[in-house]
Image: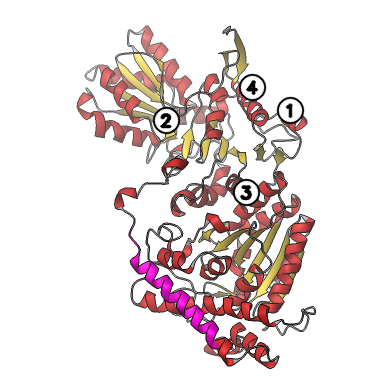
């Protein structure tokens, strides 16, 4: 697979200043948040597994534009960006990574298991492919109750090799369920390149075997992602049927903080860095005369301020009392919470 | 109310329970392999497709992981799914969903989500269907915190356990022993929900506690009957709920009889019987007159031929022999 050149992408609406700045702001928030997470990991404030989204921000930011508050999201263990863009507060995410009670999962899930009922964010699923059946079920519930909602299910290219992917695609298509399958193809299943584990590396082609619309989009181009996601989400919402988008992207950082990143050439990473979605959109906005230097500074300032506040919130947070260890293994009466 | 009794089979009792649940709550639906047009592999859901239609009686592809996971998602989406997994052996294909999602999400999310899901599955041997359709894996699943496990062994429980299981905000697994579907019994007309918390004494006795569940309950009762002929009064305790265990009932029974035999169709090593035995050691050690005994399945993949299958399964005669040895250790 080559780096997408966007030549087959459909026409995208002219860039409006306000919207362009919004997209850039969202990508910057995610990027700066995770850069800070690296520092905090090094300082042992954040422990366990941590998977960075750096390089892939255009996917979460672009797709989320197509979703509405009533829609559901099922994400993977590389989901800090998705949660942030969806509207889970940076403080609740950071506190979760600190393992604090104020975290969006009471500190019990950590980086890989961000949950938030208020924004219908259903995890944070760290079994590759494990979220897909859940998404199918959430969409089935919507269909049975006559609700016109979309369940957006993010998963990586690695999940396409799992049986749960094929079972879920089949079921969603067979039952015509409103699932938006969003395959974030960053070309590696942990450290194994897609050519080394997939018989068919055109994942949209593979998905189209399940009788649903499926196409690929340049996942490094936030506006192309948004356009594709809007089109796909409309098909799901109005057509009441599933749709598959392959978002061709790349992670600039290692798989996780434990990964020495020995399986791919440095030149490959450098080549992809030239397609970094943040400088790309910045340049596009500047070329169109829509972004002044002061605007950029303001976006950076706002992101930094939000992150500092999130860290302060996490630092000030409490640890869950050990006596609560076994709470919620089984559901508690609602009034007790 | 007149307590006029009706005679029905375990299968019919299950069907009545499902039908009643579908009638009582629009959110309830049944899905699984062959639950619709076929009428259920074991005939439990026969006629329900015709009555309730394909939206609520959903035949699924052979995709255990997807449809069990879809059940979890639908439960999180305010539905009340009953998922049928044809046999416990096939639930291994859905173990990721059962363990990593159904049992985990409530705790891992800090209590934000409930999974009011019921999964029914057939379990057990005795029908010469060999090693890939005969196992009793309840003990494995009972290992997992976050799940509740029920083993209806009587007509009353087959009829009455589903409604409270559906009302429970947690994932509940119901194990139906394949050898019980044709069992017949009497039930008062209008019998309904039973408790899903406590074990039940199915036969009172003072000399030994036979602790059984599911398919081994009839075996234990047959052994008790034979022992009675020899003047030994065996108490038969039906566990009914395999997780969380009714420890109180176990300790209470053993404290009266001072002898315990656990009868479990699972393999002995790492079994539910091992867990029950450990609870007795922890809570009633000084009540025991003799060591706890276990009658379990032989530790082999279940063989096809009748004589070998029977040799591998817990038998009433084995229980009788074990009890006689406990009562007369030098005999």
Separation of marks 3 and 2 at Cα, in angstroms: 32 Å
Q: Residues within 10 Å of mark 1 (few under 14, many from 20)?
A: some
Which region is colored magenta?
A: A297-319
- Pointer 4 chain: B
Mark closest to the chain's N terminus, 1 or 3: 1
Mark closest to the chain's N terminus, 3 or 4: 4
Magenta stretch mostly in which secondary structure? helix
Q: Out of A328 and A334, give the one closest to the viewer.
A: A334
Picture coordinates of residue A284, whole percent (x, y) = 67, 88
Picture coordinates of residue B25, whole percent (x, y) = 64, 33
Quadrant position of the N terminus of chain A in the picture: bottom right
Residue B70's disc number? 3
Mark 1 near mark 2, Cβ–Cβ under 8 Å?
no
Q: Is residue B44 toward the left or the right of residue B248 in the image? A: right
Mark closest to the chain's N terminus, 4 or 1: 4
Tell me if residue B196 comes above or below residue A78 in the rendering.
Answer: above
Separation of marks 2 and 4 at Cα, in angstroms: 25 Å
Number of marks:
4
| Label 2: element kind | strand
Residue B47's disc number? 1
């Amino acid at each position: 697979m080559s780096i997408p050149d966007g030549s087959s992408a459909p026409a995208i609406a002219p860039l409006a200043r306000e919207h362009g700045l919004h997209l850039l702001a969202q990508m910057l928030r995610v990027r700066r948040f995770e850069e800070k997470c690296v520092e905090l990991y090094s300082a042992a404030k954040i422990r366990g597994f941590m998977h960075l989204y750096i390089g892939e921000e255009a996917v979460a930011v672009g797709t989320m534009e197509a979703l509405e508050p009533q829609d559901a999201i099922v994400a993977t263990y590389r989901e800090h960006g998705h949660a942030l863009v969806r509207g889970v507060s940076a403080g609740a995410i950071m506190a979760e990574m600190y393992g604090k009670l104020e975290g969006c999962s009471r500190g019990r899930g950590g980086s890989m298991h961000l949950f938030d009922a208020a924004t219908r964010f259903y995890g944070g699923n760290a079994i590759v492919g494990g979220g897909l059946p859940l998404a199918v079920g959430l969409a089935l519930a919507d269909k049975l109750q006559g609700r016109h909602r979309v369940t957006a299910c993010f998963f990586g290219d690695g999940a396409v090799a799992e049986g749960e992917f094929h079972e879920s695609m089949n079921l969603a298509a067979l039952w015509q369920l409103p699932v938006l399958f969003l395959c974030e193809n960053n070309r590696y299943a942990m450290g194994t390149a897609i050519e080394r584990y997939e018989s068919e590396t055109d994942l949209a082609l593979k998905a189209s075997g399940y009788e649903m619309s499926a196409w690929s989009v340049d996942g490094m181009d936030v506006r192309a992602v948004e356009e594709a996601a809007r089109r796909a989400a409309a098909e799901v919402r109005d057509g009441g049927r599933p749709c598959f988008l392959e978002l061709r992207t790349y992670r600039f950082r290692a798989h996780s903080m434990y990964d020495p990143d020995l399986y791919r050439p440095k030149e490959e990473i450098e080549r992809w860095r030239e397609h970094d979605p943040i400088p790309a959109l910045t340049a596009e906005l500047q070329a169109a005369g829509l972004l002044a230097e002061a605007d950029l500074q303001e976006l950076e300032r706002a992101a930094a301020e939000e992150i500092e506040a999130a860290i302060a919130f996490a630092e000030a947070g409490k640890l869950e009392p050990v006596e609560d260890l076994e709470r919620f293994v089984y559901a508690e009466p609602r009034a007790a919470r | 109310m007149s307590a006029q009794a009706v005679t029905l089979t375990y299968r019919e009792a299950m069907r009545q329970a499902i039908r009643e649940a579908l009638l009582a709550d629009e959110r309830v639906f049944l899905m699984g392999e062959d639950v619709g047009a076929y009428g259920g592999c074991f005939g439990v859901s026969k006629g329900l497709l015709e009555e309730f239609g394909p939206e609520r009686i959903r035949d699924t592809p052979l995709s255990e992981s997807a449809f069990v996971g879809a059940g979890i998602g639908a439960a999180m989406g305010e539905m009340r799914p009953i998922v049928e997994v044809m046999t416990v052996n096939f639930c291994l294909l859905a173990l990721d969903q059962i363990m990593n999602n159904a049992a985990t999400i409530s705790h891992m999310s800090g209590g934000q989500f409930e999974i009011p899901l019921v999964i029914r599955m057939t379990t057990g041997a005795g029908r010469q269907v060999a090693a890939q359709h005969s196992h009793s894996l309840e003990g494995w699943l009972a290992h997992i915190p976050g799940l509740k496990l029920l083993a209806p062994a009587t007509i009353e429980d087959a009829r009455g356990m589903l409604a409270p299981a559906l009302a429970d905000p947690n994932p509940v697994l119901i194990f139906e022993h394949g050898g019980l579907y044709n069992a017949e019994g009497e039930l008062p007309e209008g019998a309904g929900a039973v408790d899903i918390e406590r074990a039940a004494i199915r036969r009172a006795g003072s000399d030994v506690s036979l602790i059984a569940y599911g398919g081994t309950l009839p075996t234990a009762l047959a052994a008790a009957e034979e022992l009675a002929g020899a003047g030994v009064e065996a108490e038969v305790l039906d566990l009914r709920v395999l997780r969380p265990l009714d420890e109180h009932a176990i300790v209470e029974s053993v404290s009266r009889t001072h002898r315990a035999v656990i009868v479990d169709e699972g393999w002995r090593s790492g079994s539910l019987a091992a867990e029950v035995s450990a609870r007795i050691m922890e809570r009633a050690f000084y009540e025991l007159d003799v060591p706890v005994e276990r009658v379990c399945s032989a530790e082999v993949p279940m063989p096809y031929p009748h004589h070998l299958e029977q040799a591998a399964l817990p038998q009433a005669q084995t229980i009788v022999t074990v009890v006689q040895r406990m009562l007369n250790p030098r005999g």
